[in-house]
């Protein structure tokens, strides 16, 4: 009795299957979906124009016209913040760069250049620790991004009440509220 | 589990998963296509990508969501679309988690300007649940709507 020879081994990698379809097929399908979506997105951008983001200070016209803030962000209006600048228990914190801070900032404000460091240093948190209210500000954009981010970090660090100044530094200066230059 | 797929109940579960993810993606894509500027601002508010990327994603992502939704609902390249959708959902969940960790109370941007809602763990849980549905679609056999009627054999997808 002769033994039947073994069937020849398949050459090349053995395709992986998931329920009747090779993984390669699924990946190819996903690439096709990605390609069609990207092509339509490109066409959409070219035909209708690419989305624009609010330019810095574009909306900083006055205290009366606040930035397009997200409704959930805890903001404080410029005119409401003005009397608090004389209150020793209220601290202002500047989220802009060190150079911008030196050029001019809200009187008694603390510098916390969030864009440069990416974090809030312990010295800044310690300087603000005793304040009953901390007001963060930057230059105004559609979301006042830097000050919003800084406010979130400070709140996370345990400061009890942190808010973001509507209109930022530009609106503050435009309203003639007290500011100073230097460190 | 393998016997489950191919049965009427198994086919139905796959179709329902596809329908849920497809409808959610369709509902998310249309308002964003109508107002890509608001969506680009929402992306920018997360502070995760440069401005240029936020602008490009504001225009392209809604169309990708639309294509994925149509593929899932029609059954054409449904498993590939589920893979893409799951990837997008994981990226979105990562962005939401990042915002929550930093306590950045921004608009979720999940459904464009049509339904503004702030980021929250509920949004993350929704994305994870939808990702699980996508994984189910990827793992299940490729079935058509007719599979709901009877026990028919799974459709072979060619490539």
Image (tube, coloured by chain):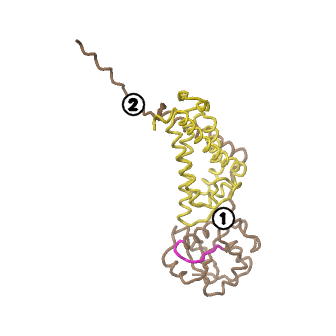
Chain colours: A brown, B yellow
Task: Give the CA distance from mark 2 to mark 1.
Answer: 52 Å
Given the current orientation, which residue lies at the most extreme top position? A1
Please name the residue shown 36% across and 25% down the image: A10
Q: Is residue A47 left or right of residue B64?
A: right
- Residue at numbered disc 2: A14
Which sits earlier in the primary sequence, circle 2 or circle 1?
2
A77 shown above or below B65: below
In this rendering, does residue A151 appear at all? yes
A20 lies left or right of A64: left
Chain name for mark 2? A
Nearer the viewer's eye, disc 2 or disc 1? 2
> Would you place residue A55 above or below residue A180 in this image?
above
**Magenta includes A137?**
no
Element class at badge 1? loop
Q: Which residue is mark 1?
A: A143
Q: Count neighbours of disc 2 (C-alpha within 10 A) and say few if under 14, some if 14 to 19, many if 20 or more.
A: few
Name the one closer to the observer, A49 or B34.
B34
Residue at (63, 74) in percent of width and height: A163
**Residue extending farthest right:** A64
Front residue of B134 and A146 = B134
Where is residue B41, by image quadrant? bottom right
Residue A32 found in image quarter: top right
Mark 1 chain: A
């Amino acid at each position: 009795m002769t033994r039947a020879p073994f069937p020849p081994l398949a050459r090349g990698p053995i395709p992986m299957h998931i329920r009747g379809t090779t993984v390669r097929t699924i990946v190819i399908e996903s690439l096709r979906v990605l390609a069609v979506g990207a092509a339509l997105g490109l066409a959409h951008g070219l035909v209708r124009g690419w989305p624009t983001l609010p330019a810095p200070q574009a909306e900083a016209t006055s205290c009366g016209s606040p930035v397009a803030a997200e409704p959930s962000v805890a903001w404080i209006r410029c005119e409401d913040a003005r009397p608090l600048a004389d209150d020793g228990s209220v601290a202002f914190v500047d989220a802009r760069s060190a150079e911008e801070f030196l050029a001019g900032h809200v009187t008694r404000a603390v510098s916390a250049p969030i864009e440069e460091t990416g974090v809030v240093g312990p010295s800044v948190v310690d300087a603000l620790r005793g304040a009953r209210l901390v007001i963060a500000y930057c230059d105004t954009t559609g979301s006042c991004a830097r000050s919003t981010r800084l406010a979130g970090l400070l709140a996370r660090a345990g400061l009890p009440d942190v808010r973001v100044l509507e209109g930022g530094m530009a609106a503050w200066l435009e309203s003639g509220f007290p500011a100073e230059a230097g460190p | 589990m393998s016997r489950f797929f191919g049965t009427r109940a198994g086919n139905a579960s796959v179709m329902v998963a596809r329908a849920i993810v497809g409808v959610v993606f369709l509902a998310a894509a249309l308002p964003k296509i109508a107002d890509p500027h608001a969506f680009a601002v929402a992306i920018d508010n997360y502070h995760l990508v440069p401005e240029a990327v936020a602008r490009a994603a504001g225009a392209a992502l809604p169309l990708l969501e639309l294509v994925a939704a149509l593929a899932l609902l029609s059954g054409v390249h449904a498993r590939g679309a589920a893979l893409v959708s799951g990837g997008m959902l994981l990226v979105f969940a990562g962005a939401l988690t990042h915002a929550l960790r930093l306590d950045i109370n921004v608009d979720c941007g999940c459904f464009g300007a049509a339904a503004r809602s702030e980021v929250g763990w509920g949004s993350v849980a929704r994305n994870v649940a939808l990702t699980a549905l996508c994984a189910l679609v990827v793992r299940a056999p490729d079935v058509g709507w007719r599979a709901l009627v009877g026990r028919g054999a799974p459709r072979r997808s060619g490539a």
